[in-house]
Image: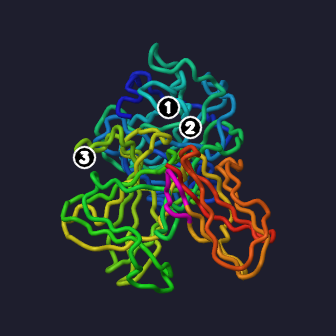
Amino acid sequence: MNNFTRLLSTAALLTCATAASAQTLYDNFENTRLVSYPIVEGTLVQNAANPGSNPVNTSPTCASYARAAAAQYAVLVVKPNNARMDNVTAYTTGGAKRISVKFRSPAAGVTVGVVLQNSRLNTANYPTGKFGTEYTAVTTVANAWEVLTFTPSPAGAGNFDASVTVTDIDQMLFQVAPNSNNSATYYLDDIMGPELLAVAPPTNLAVRQLYDNYDGTRVIKYIAPKSSGGLKLDTLNNSVSAGNTSARVARYTRSTNQYDVLVMQPRGAALADVTNFKSTAATALHMTLKVFSVAPGVLYQITLQDSTVAGASNYPAGRNSEYTATTTVTNGWENLSFNFLGAPSTTANTSVNEIVLLVAPNTTTRRKIYLDDFYGPSLVGFVPTATRTISTDFAAFAPAYPNPTSGLTQLPFSLQKQSVVSLAVFDNLGRRVAQLINGEPRAAGQFTAELNAAKLAPGLYTCRLTVDGVSLTRPLSVE
């Protein structure tokens, strides 16, 4: 993003002297929160105290933005939640409708730019996805609130994407002090933008999915050549308790590397669009991981990245997003919820194919840790279901083995009484791909059905055992 709008000419940056405003309040950082901030080059705090109330802004809460000094063209992306902008023609003429924001700067004369974009196109090099009008304003006071009203001007030839029309825009970005290495802190409130049109959430966005419970569900694989420490899967739970009643967990021995990594990749399908996780908004989804914590204050970090770009020595290339959580207990299990930290690069949200876990990054202490029940962004084709039933008073459906598989797979089940049984396998579109038992009476006892997974395409499947009309399900991953 460093060169995203280097075309902004400071000679053309003018403030609007007339009182003109947009039609929609996007965010007042209190009770109106219509947007999220998927890319922040710097640090954004969305519940900052007003540093100095004046007649322009008496609100007790605002946002603070500490600009990233290393980013010459640092950006703060504002994306409407499940919405796009209506026709923005009225905002390109300098007429009555203007984009505006309440702004507090440590100095007068600071340029602020606004760019409108199509986020689906904005995955390649500048200026792909950029609308052909630029919007600019300049601060006039220091350490006091003022309303910045943005003046539109046509972008120069070659500095915008002609395919982006007035009805294609679904996000805007702010650039504070572009073409500088400024690291000052600024304050924003009452962001006003073009009218919004609600759209259905994209069906390709990732939801939460169980990656591994070390008891039969595993939709990820562990990349030993890339990982620093030693991993033992499906080991006995070192401390069965209310915090984690699972019989089996994973044990990972952290190496003495300063940035020790445990590298994972999805099985059978790619990760879906991770947009829902890249946000600090209340509606954001969170990755979670149960860990046995030996002490409070141990930092865990997850990085989502594109393995075709990210290398051991080229950070931040290929790193889509980073998330952190910190332990709070001593010698006990806890469920860590990872919060979005930032987006180190502009890697597309649809290009993530690798998950990296860092334990106590920037330390060199060797330590043994236990992990369980890892949830992250879902794989393409995953269909969320209600909590799966795996047993009743009269029947139980054991995990498939081996799982993942590419050949013969055993599906064990048991009956406590004579029952009518069906057993079928369904893909993630709900289509039946195999019928192993079809309404057959079975006596009480232990049974195992056999599936030849070599006939199935790689991906995620659901095995459904129906006993006297009650369905029990187990997941299956085919490589």
Q: Quadrant of the N terminus?
A: top left
Q: Is residue 239 above or below residue 290?
A: below
Instruction: Measure the C-alpha gap from mark 2 to mark 3.
Output: 33 Å
Which callout, 1 or 3, points to the residue nearer the camera?
Answer: 3
Q: Position of residue 19 (x, y in %)?
A: 62, 35
Circle 2: residue type: Gln
Point out the tag, 2 or 3, that comes first from the N-terminus: 2
Which callout, 2 or 3, points to the residue nearer the camera?
Answer: 3
Q: Position of residue 291 (x, y in %)?
A: 40, 73
Task: State whether residue 56 appears in this view.
Answer: no
Q: Position of residue 109 (x, y in %)?
A: 38, 36
Q: Nearer the viewer, residue 24 or 479?
A: 479
Q: Secondary structure at mark 2?
A: strand
Label 3 CA crowd tier, 10 Å (few <14, some 14–19, many 20+): few
**What secondary structure is the stretch in magenta mostly built from?**
loop
Q: Position of residue 75 (x, y in %)?
A: 42, 39
The dot on residue 312 is 3
Instruction: Measure the C-alpha gap from mark 2 to mark 1.
Output: 10 Å
Q: Residue at x 36, y 60 (%)?
A: 301
Instruction: Measure the C-alpha gap from mark 1 to mark 3.
Output: 26 Å
Question: In this picture, which residue range is highlighted in magenta?
Answer: 400-409
Point out the tag, 1 or 3, that comes first from the N-terminus: 1
Task: State whether residue 81 appears in this view.
Answer: yes
Q: Is residue 129 above or below residue 48?
A: above
Q: Residue at x 48, y 30 (%)?
A: 136
The residue beneath circle 1 is 122
The residue beneath circle 2 is 171
Circles 1 and 3, Cβ within 8 Å, touching? The answer is no
